[in-house]
Amino acid sequence: MNDRKETPTGSNESPAQIVDRLLQRTAIGVSLLTISYAMAAAMYVISDQEIVDLMDRLQLVPSILVLLIVFPAFVKFARLRYRQKSECAEADGYLVEMFKRASAMAFSLTFVFLIILEPVTGKYLTELPTPFFINVTLAFSLGVLSIAFFRSVRGDSDDESDDDFDTELAP
Amino acid sequence: MTGKLNNRIRVYRAEHRLSQGDLAERIGVTRKTISTIEVGRFVPSTVIALKIARYFGVPVEDIFSLNDDVDVSESTANT
């Protein structure tokens, strides 16, 4: 019953699985970008030039990892779209819904964060440049998105017990 | 309308001797989607609910129902 068939996508993955994989990898990529933006922001407040130089070099690592992790999944997804698999556009499975919820939460909390940040920057952080605040905001927003997504899908391995009734009912 | 969504997917799967993966493949979703719907963790979209019902050849309300369906029908009868 569980034999995987070759699909028109050129692999044994269904379109829904390809969409889910892209979402999972996007969430991992977003986590890595959070680190990258946080490091970029930290460089404005760290005074030690050696540490800043080191962070500047290290900042490339998450960016490269994002490319390596997300790009292959994106290529598969793009190939699927190219072959006019309408399933991609209609995908409304569990992970898609969780990603949408995480995105909505990230947007809301970023909005609140900016509202709080606005008076704080006017009074206390006046000497810091604009790129610092842009990096902080991006790190916050992407961080909330990835945390919300991974929190909502954590512990799902408990639900993974597949019921193969053929096996269960076999004499 | 705030009642928890009950479903009988597992019952129908047992009748048709289908695994979660098989059902998922047939309606074009992942096994995780089916398993999370079954345990009530994920409320499916109307499209997925209709696809599941169509696959089993039954009305969608045979598979999905609200916990407070009894209360609603009782209050309707009283009015």
Image (cartoon, coloured by chain):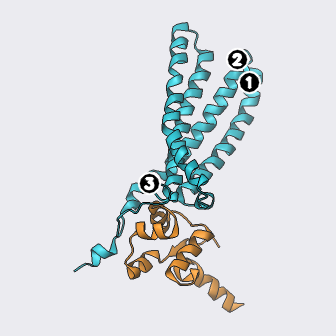
Above or below, B14 against A24 in this view is below
Q: Quadrant of the C terminus of chain B?
A: bottom right
Relative horizontal placement of residue A91, taking residue B39 as reference (left or right): right
Above or below, A91 against A63 in this view is below
Residue B64 appearing in the image:
no
Residue beneath label 3, please?
A11
Indicate the chain on which mark 3 is placed. Answer: A
Q: Mark 2 or mark 1, which has the lower sequence index?
A: 1
Amino acid found under the numbered disc labelled 1: Thr
Residue beneath label 2, please?
A128
CB of mark 1 within 8 Å of CB of mark 3? no
* Near-viewer residue (A24 or B68): A24
Give the number of marks.
3
User: Label 2 vs label 1: CA separation?
Assistant: 9 Å
Q: Tell me the colour chain B is drawn in.
A: orange
Q: Mark 2 or mark 3, which has the lower sequence index?
A: 3
Percent coordinates x, y for residue A153 in the rendering: 48, 52
Whether callout 2 and callout 1 share a subunit is answered yes
Amino acid found under the numbered disc labelled 3: Ser
Q: Quadrant of the N terminus of chain B?
A: bottom right
Q: Residues within 10 Å of mark 2 (few under 14, many from 20)?
A: few
Percent coordinates x, y for residue A147 in the rendering: 53, 42
Indicate the chain on which mark 2 is placed. Answer: A
Amino acid found under the numbered disc labelled 2: Leu
Above or below, A71 against A59 in this view is below
Q: Quadrant of residue A6?
A: bottom left
Residue beneath label 1, please?
A121
Q: Mark 1 or mark 3, which has the lower sequence index?
A: 3
* Near-viewer residue (B8 or B51): B51
Per the image, label 2 sits on a secondary structure element best described as loop
* Near-viewer residue (A97 or A67): A67
